[in-house]
């Protein structure tokens, strides 16, 4: 099969998947609304201030300034650790979040002075105007849209940093926030890509006090979002098909990714897309040629800056440790009678991945060769840990309560272990489970179980898709 034939085949496959799996629900924009209520209030406050300031700067040219904008199967993620030797469980206690009320009230009392017009701001606003003044299809090439879009994102990041850097917020609160910035290189193939596709614009996140500058040639592992750009306002399906192709690789390269976020831009219409294990959900268009559409896009970017890591799709129970050049993972240890609040876990370390989640949809099964021994020093690039266990991490169809679920993989493996240990099978080789259970983590001030129902549940308990 020629390269062109393979490319066409993949395009047809993604088009079919788009037609079968894609739904539209504008509530999905709330997926990144900060889980902490006080941070949510702060995000609204900052977005409102940024939007008003942008309107002041754009008002002379914006053509549509006053135009108005217009049952889930429960799947449970389980993590199983198998080995031929026993492992000890340690208590994993989630610390409660401190109240942000005073911090937020100190910062939200006043919006402060509007942005001062310096050379950089004037340049950014000039580029943004080229995009927000779009009427119908974008009059220019696709590549000509990249700079205005990136300038919009940088403008928001600059203002977010300004607000977070002012007196009134504790360092602890600031450390939970981030800046969302575009990748400097556009229309490029990430170094860890397994095919020839090129992404239009990538997003990365940095510490809130990092320099405001576009980041270099980011890999899929480093991205927190991808934009697919089209000049044609009606080429929505084409944009999503391209986005589907890219987003698959986010799951393959980010071993802690539970869901992925992407964006399509068709002329002036911005859509958020959420890729979960079973479906893709996109928002209604945010039309940046209108003040309401700009305000909605700004709010989304600010929410991404202030929300929990888990609300960007990352699993907080898995962490890459740059100082050791390896991954750290907490494996839950559930007993059959355990309720959703149980938090016992064992901690392991790994470098070797023997199964990656290289599919856009499905159970997103990943397998790691790991050890309970924390490395004493930083590992070399090609250095591996001496593994003693195999960790399987996957979503699975399951009942809400583990003790009532006959299909629960952890429960089944524990039964096999108990039976073989009792009957002393001798030379029979089998997977001996050490620990295993349903993945839980802290979101805001609550401990949540990582199910698809949880994934699509808003901070107020509302169903988002």
Image (tube, helix red, strand yellow):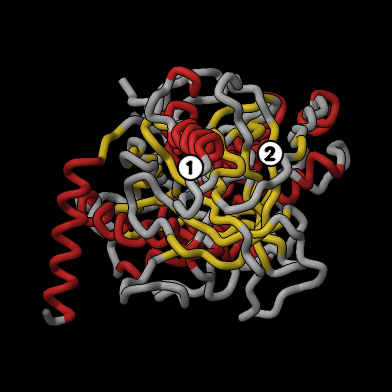
Task: Tell whether 5 sits left or right of 138.
Answer: left
Q: Which mark is residue 345?
A: 2
Describe the element under mark 2 as helix, strand or loop: strand
Residue visible at 78% across and 44% down in the picture: 174
Q: Quadrant of the C terminus?
A: top left
Residue visible at 33% across and 55% down in the picture: 359
Residue visible at 70% across and 48% down in the picture: 347
Gap between marks 2 and 1 measured at Cα: 39 Å
Q: Which mark is residue 4?
A: none
Q: Is residue 407 visible?
A: yes
Q: Nearer the viewer, residue 197 or 316?
A: 316
Q: Which mark is residue 297?
A: 1
Where is residue 277? Give x, y as percent.
37, 42
Against 279, residue 101 (above or below) is above
Q: Is residue 292 visible?
A: no
Tell me if mark 2 has few (under 14), some (14-19) or many (20+) residues whose alpha carbon lies within 10 angstroms of its own.
many
| Circles 2 and 1: CB atoms closer than 8 Å | no
Where is residue 254? Give x, y as percent.
51, 58
Q: Nearer the viewer, residue 234 or 196?
A: 196
Q: Nearer the viewer, mark 2 or mark 1?
A: 2
Residue visible at 40% across and 49% down in the picture: 364
- Locate residue 441: give its quadrant: top right
Where is residue 438? Give x, y as percent.
54, 33
Describe the element under mark 1 as helix, strand or loop: helix
Q: Quadrant of the N terminus?
A: bottom left
Tell me if mark 1 has few (under 14), some (14-19) or many (20+) residues whose alpha carbon lies within 10 angstroms of its own.
many
Upstream in sequence: badge 2 or badge 1: 1
Against 3, residue 33 (above or below) is above
Where is residue 158? Give x, y as percent.
67, 55
Q: Nearer the viewer, residue 409 or 303?
A: 409
- Locate residue 4: give its quadrant: bottom left
């Amino acid at each position: 099969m020629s390269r062109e034939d393979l490319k066409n085949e993949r395009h047809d496959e993604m088009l079919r998947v788009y037609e079968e799996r894609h739904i539209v629900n504008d509530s999905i924009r709330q997926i990144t609304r900060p889980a902490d209520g006080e941070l949510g209030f702060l995000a609204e406050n900052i977005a409102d201030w940024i939007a008003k300031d942008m309107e002041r700067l754009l008002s002379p040219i914006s053509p549509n300034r006053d135009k108005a904008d217009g049952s889930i199967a429960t799947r449970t993620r389980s993590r199983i650790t198998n080995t031929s030797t026993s492992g000890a469980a340690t208590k994993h206690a989630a610390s409660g979040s401190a109240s942000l009320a005073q911090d937020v009230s100190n910062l939200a009392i006043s919006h402060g002075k509007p942005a001062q017009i310096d050379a950089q701001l004037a340049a950014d606003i000039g580029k943004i105007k080229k995009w927000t003044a779009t009427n119908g299809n974008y009059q220019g090439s696709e590549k000509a849209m990249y700079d205005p879009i990136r300038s919009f994102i940088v403008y928001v990041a600059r203002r977010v940093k300004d607000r977070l850097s002012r007196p009134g917020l504790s360092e602890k609160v600031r450390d939970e926030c981030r800046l969302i910035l575009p990748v400097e290189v556009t229309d490029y193939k990430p170094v860890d890509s397994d095919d020839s596709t090129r992404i239009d614009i990538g997003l990365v996140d940095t510490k809130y006090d990092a320099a405001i500058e576009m980041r270099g040639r980011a890999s899929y592992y480093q991205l927190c979002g991808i934009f697919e750009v089209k000049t044609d306002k009606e080429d929505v399906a084409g944009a999503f098909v391209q986005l589907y192709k890219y987003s698959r690789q986010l799951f393959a390269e980010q071993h802690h990714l539970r869901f992925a976020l992407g964006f399509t831009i068709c002329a002036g219409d911005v859509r958020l897309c959420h890729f979960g294990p079973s479906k893709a959900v996109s928002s209604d268009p945010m039309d940046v040629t209108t003040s309401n559409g700009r305000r909605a896009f700004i709010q989304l970017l600010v929410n991404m800056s202030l929300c929990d890591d888990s609300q960007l799709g990352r699993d907080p129970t898995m962490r890459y440790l740059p100082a050791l050049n390896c991954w750290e993972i907490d494996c839950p240890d559930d007993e059959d009678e355990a309720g959703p609040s149980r938090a016992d876990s064992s901690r392991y370390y790994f470098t070797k991945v023997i199964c990656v989640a290289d599919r856009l949809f499905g159970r997103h099964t990943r397998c790691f060769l790991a050890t309970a021994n924390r490395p004493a020093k930083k590992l070399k690039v090609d250095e591996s840990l001496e593994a003693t266990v195999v960790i399987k991490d996957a979503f699975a169809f399951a009942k809400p309560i583990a003790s009532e679920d006959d299909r629960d993989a952890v429960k089944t493996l524990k039964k096999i272990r108990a039976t073989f240990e009792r009957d002393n099978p001798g030379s029979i080789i089998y997977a001996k489970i050490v620990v295993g259970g349903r993945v839980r983590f802290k979101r805001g001030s609550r401990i949540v179980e990582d199910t698809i129902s949880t994934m699509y549940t808003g901070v107020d308990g509302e169903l988002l898709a």
